[in-house]
Image (spheres, rainbow, N blue to C red):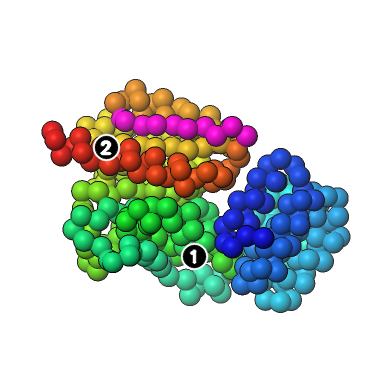
Amino acid sequence: MFQKFSEYQKQLFQLYSEQRYSEALRIAEEAGRSFPTRAGRTIYWRACLLCRLGKPDEALRVLQEGLRDGHWWGISKLSADADLAPLQGRPDFQEIVAECERRRQAAQAQAKPHLKVLEPVGGSTVKTPVLLALHWAAGNVEDFADYWQAAWQQGWLIALPQSSQICSEDGFWWPDYELGRREVLATFERFRQEYVFCADEIVIAGASQGGVLAVRLALEGAIPCRGFLAVVPSLRDHTVEELIPLLKAAAERGLGGWIITGERDPCLEPTRRFHEQALKHGLRCELFVKPGMGHAFPADFDTDLLQALAFFKSITSDHEHR
């Protein structure tokens, strides 16, 4: 049906947000057949959707079979996911949770930060702009790279750091900000030494939890950049409070921001508040709220991405002519 796993994921999330659970389940099953290396994730989707469809015993069986096949899932998801509420508290489900935690600890002991790079056709030069893209929670750089193809096709050098903090068999996240910050900075330093690019044209991007990390790094000036591109950033009220003191200095450096979120995103109101504060402090910042969209990438993200990159190019041009 789709050529990329990320396309299945996007379609499934959209159907889920519309409570079309039977259709979403068919997408999850098709994704599992088309991408057997992503079986752990598609098994989890199926279990969640079966619970939503009133079939908890079938959902439990799907998870048990997946566990026997060597898959596992993060206990924070298993224990707190509202989709799995019919299973939580059952002894047979708690056995799954306990085994998943044992497997997570073993995997975490071996996990290291990783970097995937998409270099433009023909290589990069001193004029090549850079997009540093930070994956969302439970993501990985292989899947996340699909979202940035439009930038790569336009000649951008794409750097995709992957966190060492593991939350599922193929999912990584950034719950420890200081650790994530250190890893991204160290990864970027290695990237800087290995690749040629324009140091004045760097944009830090990210989605969800990675979107918040991208905003923080850009505002702090930890990596000199033109600005941040945040897709459905998982901002909270306390996070906004922590970021406000950084806005004035970032605005004075000429930083820009581009935020895309959804009308149904649970973090919409803190995101609106952050945008208001950014403008109040003089930061050039755009906010786009997609009608009907939840916590997901927009269906037309390629178009949004190219518009955002043009915005950052204009900031670079303005900066050069000061």
Q: Residue 66: x and y, percent?
A: 73, 71
In the rendered structure, which segment of residues is drawn in magenta? 283-292
Across and down, in percent, residue 297 comes to: 54, 46
Name the mark on residue 142: 1
From this viewpoint, is residue 193 visible? yes
**Could you say which quadrant of the image residue 158 lies in?**
bottom left
Q: Nearer the viewer, residue 26 or 103?
A: 26
277 above or below 307?
above
Question: Residue at position x 59%, y 68% from top?
Answer: 169
Vertical comparison of 301 with 240: above or below: below
The quarter of the image holding the N terminus is: bottom right
> Measuring 40% from the left and 60% from the top, which residue is drawn there?
160
First in sequence: mark 1 or mark 2?
Answer: 1
Q: Position of residue 217 (x, y in %)?
A: 33, 47
Residue 286 lies, with reference to residue 49, above or below; the image says above
Question: With 307 as the anchor, is 60 left or right in this view?
Answer: right
Q: On the rendered structure, is 4 left or right of 321?
A: right
User: Amino acid type of disc 1?
Assistant: Glu
Q: Residue at x 85, y 61 (%)?
A: 58
Q: Residues within 10 Å of mark 1 (few under 14, many from 20)?
A: some
Whether residue 134 is visible: no
The dot on residue 115 is: none
Residue 256 location, quadrant? top left
How far is the residue under mark 1 from the one under mark 2? 30 Å
Secondary structure at badge 2 equals: helix
- Classed neighbour count for the residue bearing mark 2: other residues with Cα under 10 Å, few (<14), some (14–19), many (≥20): some
Which is more toward the observer, 163 or 229?
229
Residue in the foreground of this view, choosing between 127 and 277: 127
- Residue 278 pos. (x, y %): 36, 29
Could you tell me what secondary structure mostly forms the magenta stretch? strand
Q: Amino acid at mark 2?
A: Ser
Tag of residue 314: 2
